[in-house]
Image: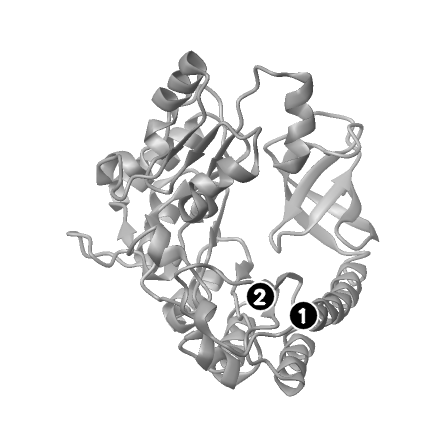
Amino acid sequence: LGRLKRLKTHHPALKIILAGCAAQQLGNKLLKRFDHLDLVLGTRAISAVGDLLEKIQQTNKRLAYLPEVDSMTPRELFTAAPAATSPVTAPVTIMQGCNNFCTYCIVPYVRGRERSRPSREILDEIEKLTSCGTREVLLLGQNVNSYGRGLEEKISFVELLHRIQEETNLLRLRFTTSHPKDLTDELIRCFADLPVLCKYLHLPVQAGSDRILKRMNRGYTAGHYLEKIQRLREACPEIGLSSDIIVGFPGETEEDFQQTMDLLKTVQYDNLFSFRYSDRPHARAAAFDDKLDEETKARRLMELQALQADITLRKNEAEVGTLREILVEGPSKTQEELLTGRTHQNRIVHFESTRPCTGELITVRILGAASHSLKGEPAA
């Protein structure tokens, strides 16, 4: 929002809208803090964005709209707007909300309890996307493993994945996010049994200390998590793994933090999303009284990210000389003369091509590795 202020200075007619969890949580406070922000939309207000945008354009008044109930029916909540063309990769929401109540998280409070979408609607949306050019779909939900609970039809997430494999023309399928406590052996087998499913899983661990995991209300131990990682790699040896980690959770000791570092060394993630703990209103951890100082949290985050950077670079360097199938997404964002694609393991590959091949699956030879991407060439 701070960076956008300069843009609005040069383009006064620009309207800036903030939507999502932070918007629902902070509401009018955001309008007071950011005088260039025009509209704040809560998590249950997205369907009203057109009418509200028209209203603020006509009245020139800033507005926060934070309804307590969904402004859409359950069916409208998930319906995608039709499009004449689609990107190579596209998201498809299969559920919203969460029932887990991790002590650091506000999702159950601002997005409500789990609501799954009927499978026929999901399949229809995927069919529309593929007919317009989409080749890969990312299934979205706060906890996709819980998909199907509460629906009139009897269907599990594993069954949904099998139906997508059998009933659509997708080239690739991914999903996020999964909760470790709900990762079943049946879902693990999907990575070996379903050709459409990419060999990649984002599985948030959050901490490597059992004491901290219990305080977070995560519902598993580090040992249980590592057992699931082992079963994943036994079922699909080439699977790529990423995770989320929070450092500096209230009460985290140096020993707790070192247990998290040890878990990183054991798992050897391909990529990691890491954060310093910060309070969220309504979340239980906000009331914990043993908070860590910012300096300690910053130091631990720096150590964690340095370790992961070394692991990621080593894993990328191990790719040099291999042949990998990638889905070509289009021109590189940083070098327009290059094309970009992703491997099954979600690694970015930049390469030169003598022909347009966006949307195609091609095989490339990996020639070089950097911290966040690979360099390749089409295999002969």
In the rendered structure, which amino acid carries the disc numbered 1? Answer: Lys
What residue sits 39% from the left and 59% below the top?
A: 143
The answer to whether 74 appears left or right of 236 in the picture is left
What residue sits 73% from the left and 45% below the top?
A: 349
The image position of residue 249, as x and y in percent, is: 56, 73
Q: Residue furthest left?
A: 152
Its colouring scheme is one colour
What residue sits 56% from the left and 31% below the top?
A: 35
Q: Report the number of numbered marks.
A: 2
The answer to whether 38 appears left or right of 330 in the picture is left
- The label shown at residue 108 is none
Residue behind mark 2? 277
Question: Looking at the rendering, which quadrant does residue 144 occupy?
Answer: bottom left
Determine whether the residue tagged by mark 1 lies in a helix, strand or loop. Answer: helix
Relative to 59, say whether 175 is above or below. below
Residue behind mark 1? 297
Among numbered discs 1 and 2, the one appearing first in the sequence: 2
